[in-house]
Image: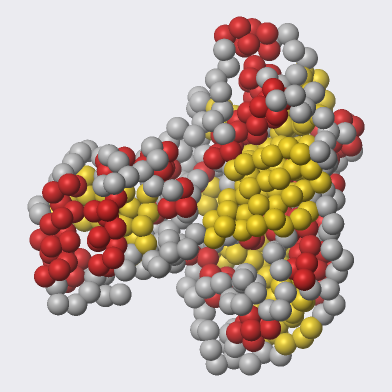
């Protein structure tokens, strides 16, 4: 069984986001970048399935600028066998990414495609479902547990009401929740070994896919600031304020 | 052109958040049609037809719609899409799972999780977990949009009498099978819709200490939340998590107890109307968003809080 895992390079989750003064976006210069957190869960799950003997090959794929290759290299260091980097600059919307990934799936013919449930930069939560639609595959989004069975997966999904379990036939697409597993760190020897693993580079323009953005970004703003509140000196004062001033209890 | 709204329900009742989504839909265009896909969901269709802002209800019923599988739902919506300029639903897990599957088939770039309607093609949406807000304009002729329900008021739920139209069911997608759903049952209000939420963080020190929070939640008829740190430490189950990777809540009153206020937590609660922070660290970032901050040891403050509440003659429910 072959697993394709899609990863995205995003601003590191610990970075305090700053909006550019001219309102054209957020500051990305000299900002730490890393793999989108739930994409790390996707790689980890693929590696665990391979370690259990149920998968034979893991291919990590990313779409993005030159430096996006770093996220593929990291995936190789934690256990992916080879990488694919589709070079594309500027804003690539989820629809365009899913069309590019479809081309890769058509060529690679994986049994499973894994990726994070959502990227923490644009927060779109679309790419996995869109790719699944374009392929007419079953989809299991927000996965927090995956059992690999013969030609099937049983997946537990995190939904608003609690948990849902579905069974899907392979080939299938799964988007991973942070609760799926605990991603491992790459060991130094594995980081060294990953440098020798192959990464195939392609240009998005070679794939005959229209990736022109269809959504115009008018402006990006800071969220409305909350007015500074007050400190109360004791619990009695707090309860009085809530009752008589804020009138919420 | 008209807006097609995919109603969220459980085959018996309309989900409360659908009312908020209807409000947003009506701001895009006044001709809102609601699509109810399900199994034996006549009561839902009737309730939907009573929403004054809904002009028409379309129902599609079949056993394979019982469990809201996106692979079964998407073709129904795509078949109806030609009559509509906008297709919308809530940005809950239901809509997040379903809408991109529709958008991709319609070759539309979806606009996710909008918090404001500027015009029929321009919307505001949070990015970077609400640390920035983008105003975006969709250039697609047919627009697919998911709506953050807590950013819009609920619409009127009675007085309307929209016509109900049935349409034929599609085929079942045989490669996906529903197995089971484990819903979290609770006598408390749901975290996402509660008027009051009280949350505990790492400062609670262990799961047993959450009983201090439970006692106050009982008194205020509040939902119980938690920070990711408290969930990860195993103090409380993950369905209570408020924040970027948990639930986004917008109650009238949010009480953060022993929560430092990491960016990820603030993303889930800072739109609350009134925020109270109880923390012994006066420098904790949670105080920067709190309307009322109490710098105190929570193990002393919570019992006192309960005592003060007990002294009140009336408490809003």
In which quadrant of the rendered view does residue B39 lie?
bottom right
Tell me: A96 left or right of B149: right
Q: Position of residue B71 (x, y in %)?
A: 78, 58
Q: How many marks?
A: 0
Above or below for A233 versus B59 = above
Instruction: Residue at 70%, 75% (x, y): give it.
Output: B36
Residue A212 in sight from this viewpoint: no
* Residue at screen point 87% across, 66% down: B171
Q: Is A223 located above or below residue A161 in the figure?
A: above
Q: How far from the left and from the top, in percent, is residue B185?
A: 47, 63
Quadrant in the picture for residue B49: bottom right
Q: Quadrant of the C terminus of chain A?
A: bottom left
Quadrant placement of the N terminus of chain A: top right
| Image side of residue A70 versus residue B108, left or right | left
Above or below residue B208? Residue A114 is: above
Q: What is the x, y in percent for residue A28?
A: 53, 32
Is B74 left or right of A12, judged from the image as shown? right
What kind of colouring is applied to the model shown? Answer: secondary structure
């Amino acid at each position: 069984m072959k697993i394709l895992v899609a990863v995205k390079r995003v601003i590191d989750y610990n970075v305090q986001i700053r909006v550019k003064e001219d309102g054209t976006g957020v500051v990305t210069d000299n900002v730490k970048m890393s793999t989108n957190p739930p994409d790390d869960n996707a790689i980890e799950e693929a590696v665990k399935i391979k370690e259990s003997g149920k998968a034979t090959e893991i291919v990590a794929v990313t779409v993005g600028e030159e430096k996006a290759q770093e996220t593929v290299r990291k995936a190789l260091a934690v256990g992916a066998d080879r990488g694919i980097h589709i070079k594309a600059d500027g804003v690539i919307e989820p629809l365009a990414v899913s069309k590019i990934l479809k081309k890769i799936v058509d060529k690679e013919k994986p049994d499973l495609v894994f990726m994070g449930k959502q990227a923490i930069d644009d927060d779109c939560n679309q790419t996995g479902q869109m790719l699944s639609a374009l392929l007419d595959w079953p989809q299991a989004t927000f996965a927090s547990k995956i059992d690999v069975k013969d030609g099937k997966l049983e997946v537990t999904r995190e939904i608003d009401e609690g948990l849902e379990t579905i069974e899907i036939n392979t080939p299938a697409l799964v988007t991973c929740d942070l609760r799926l597993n605990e991603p491992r760190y790459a060991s130094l020897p594995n980081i060294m070994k990953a440098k020798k693993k192959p990464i195939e580079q392609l240009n998005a323009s070679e794939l005959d896919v229209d990736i022109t953005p269809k959504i115009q970004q008018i402006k990006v703003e800071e969220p409305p600031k909350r007015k500074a509140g007050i400190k109360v000196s004791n619990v009695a004062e707090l309860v009085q304020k809530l009752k008589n001033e804020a009138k919420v209890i | 052109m008209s807006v097609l709204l995919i109603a969220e329900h459980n085959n018996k009742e309309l989900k409360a958040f659908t009312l908020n989504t209807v409000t947003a839909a009506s701001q895009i265009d006044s001709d809102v049609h609601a699509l109810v896909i399900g199994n034996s969901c006549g009561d839902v269709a009737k309730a939907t037809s009573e929403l004054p802002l809904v002009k028409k209800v379309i129902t599609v019923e079949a056993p394979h719609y019982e469990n809201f599988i996106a692979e079964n739902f998407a073709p129904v919506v795509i078949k109806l899409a030609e009559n509509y300029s906008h297709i919308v639903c809530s940005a809950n897990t239901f809509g997040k799972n379903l809408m991109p599957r529709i958008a991709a088939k319609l070759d539309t770039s979806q606009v996710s999780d909008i918090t404001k309607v500027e015009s029929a093609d321009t919307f505001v949406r949070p990015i970077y977990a609400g640390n920035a807000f983008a105003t975006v304009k969709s250039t697609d002729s047919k627009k697919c949009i998911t709506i953050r329900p807590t950013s819009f008021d609920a619409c009127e739920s009675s007085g309307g009498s929209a016509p109900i139209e049935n349409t034929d069911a599609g085929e079942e997608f045989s490669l996906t099978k529903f197995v089971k759903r484990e819903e979290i049952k609770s006598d408390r209000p749901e975290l996402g819709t509660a008027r009051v939420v009280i949350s505990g963080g790492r400062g609670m020190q262990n799961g047993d200490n959450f009983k201090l929070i439970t006692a106050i939640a009982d008194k205020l008829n509040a939902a119980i939340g938690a920070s990711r740190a408290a969930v990860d430490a195993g103090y409380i189950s993950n369905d209570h998590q408020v924040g970027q990777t948990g639930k986004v809540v917008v109650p009238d009153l949010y009480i953060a107890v022993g929560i430092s206020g990491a960016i990820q937590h603030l993303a889930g609660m800072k739109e609350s109307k009134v925020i109270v922070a109880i923390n012994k660290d006066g420098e904790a970032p949670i105080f920067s968003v709190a309307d009322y901050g109490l710098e105190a040891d929570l193990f002393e403050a919570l019992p006192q809080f309960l005592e003060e509440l007990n002294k009140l003659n009336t408490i809003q429910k």
